[in-house]
Image (cartoon, helix red, strand yellow):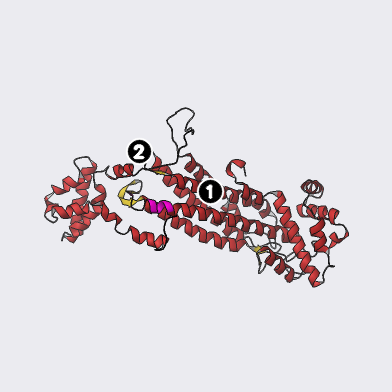
Amino acid sequence: MIPRYARAEMTRLWAPETKFEIWLEIEALACEKQEQLGTIPRGVAEKLRRHGRVDIPRIDAIEQEVRHDVVAFLTSLAEQVGEEARFVHHGMTSSDVLDTCLAVQLTRATDLLLKDLDELLVALRGRAHEAKDMICIGRSHGIHAEPTTMGLKFAQAYAEFDRNRDRLRAARAAVASCKISGAVGTYASISPEVEGHVANQLGLAPEPISTQVVPRDRHAMFFATLAVIASSVERVATEIRHLQRTEVREVEEAFAESQKGSSAMPHKRNPVLSENLTGLARLVRSMAVPALENVALWHERDISHSSVERMIAPDATVTLDFALARLTNVIKNLVLYPENMQANLERLGGLHASQAVLLALTEAGAAREDAYRIVQRTAMRAWAKDGSFRDLLAADPDVTAHLAPDVLDDAFDDARHLRNVDVVFDRVFGTAVTPS
């Protein structure tokens, strides 16, 4: 994590203070239940909460000696709590604390990411309705195809991120798993009731079967989901970058009055935010692979996953949080240029109507193969700037033999591409949805 690409609330979640506070709460909750079960004396949890505090310098100093972070934490607590500290961590292993804490942090991080997605969806929905009937050329392979609308582009992004929200909710459920089951997951020295109590109090679910750790397929799914969301961020960012190119300029990132685009060229207005999002998405996506490789641990556990998760858990969530917020800002402030959309639409002299003409010919009785040949040869002449597509068709006897002038005109009426936009919007947003 670096401050340039981090927001405060998500960053605080991964701060050492937050981690140790969660550790302390896990230990206290475990003591509570063991007191009820009669495993340890009454009053341990209360004294732990009253006297135990997070002393990071002291924990760090002890860790330098013992080379074990959980032992250092417990030793620091023992110095504060006194004799009752011998009942803290009773029957537990380090991963009971570490994995349960990670579950808490990941679920809290997910809640922030879900909030980010909700804000992005609101922005996309508003822009989609604003530009619902704003006709622009569609492109396949980067080449003019048929008209679409700018609103449909926003609606597509909305639908994609709506699916991402569902994926993230499922990923949250996957990692919301509490593990307080002892050295190899057999509950040999601690009751499963302790795990149930800790899980309930922290908003988690008991892991159905653990080893020394929670199974890492859960975490692999989580980070893979973040990677999918990051890929969606990049897809939208790439679309904006292409549409902002000078030769296209159908949209443009907002450019502040005092903003500078280049140290050398004062005229520059670059899509720097979208380019930044592309880079951030690559980083988040790269963290899915080590998470997948963490699934295969030796027997009941080895430590190869630990260093990976200490890095990717904060980095992936902090980076994606920042990226989603940045993308929301880009969408909200994106400048649209409908006049450029229209100019680009007309740039090839009506070639985007080729399918409409093809269908009109077949509906008028021409064989499809013949109709395709007629339309394509005329289109190729238009590509070669031998005249406008509409005029060349009107002068072709093979066309006029089948199509009256008014029928040919209808094929070039761009309004035909709007006839089912409302159907698509109803599918994406629902008939009751209105722009915010």
Which kind of residue does numbered mark 1 sit on? Ala
What number is the disc on residue 247?
A: 2
Q: Name the residue under label 1.
A: 325
Task: Say if residue 435 shows up in the picture.
Answer: yes
Where is residue 106, by image quadrant?
A: bottom right
Identify the residue at horizontal 26%, vertical 51% (top origin): 414
Query: Badges 2 and 1: C-beta atoms under 8 Å apart?
Result: no
Picture quadrant of residue 205: bottom right
Q: Is residue 127 magenta?
A: yes
User: Badge 2: few (under 14), some or many (20 or more) residues near its Cα, within 10 Å?
Assistant: few
Q: Residue at x 84, y 54 (%)?
A: 80
CA–CA distance in space, label 2 to label 1: 29 Å
Report the span colored magenta.
Answer: 126-135
| SS for dot 2 | loop
**Label 1 CA crowd tier, 10 Å (few <14, some 14–19, many 20+):** some
Residue depicted at 26% across the width and 55% down the height: 416
Q: In the image, residue 372 lies at what x, y percent?
A: 21, 54
Q: Position of residue 98 (x, y in %)?
A: 71, 57
- Of 386 and 408, nearer the camera is 408
Query: Among all residues in the image, which is located at the extreme right?
Result: 83
Look at the image and say whether residue 375 sits in the magenta stretch: no
Amino acid at pointer 2? Glu
Whether 129 is drawn above or below 269: the answer is below
Horizontal and vertical percent for residue 326?
52, 46
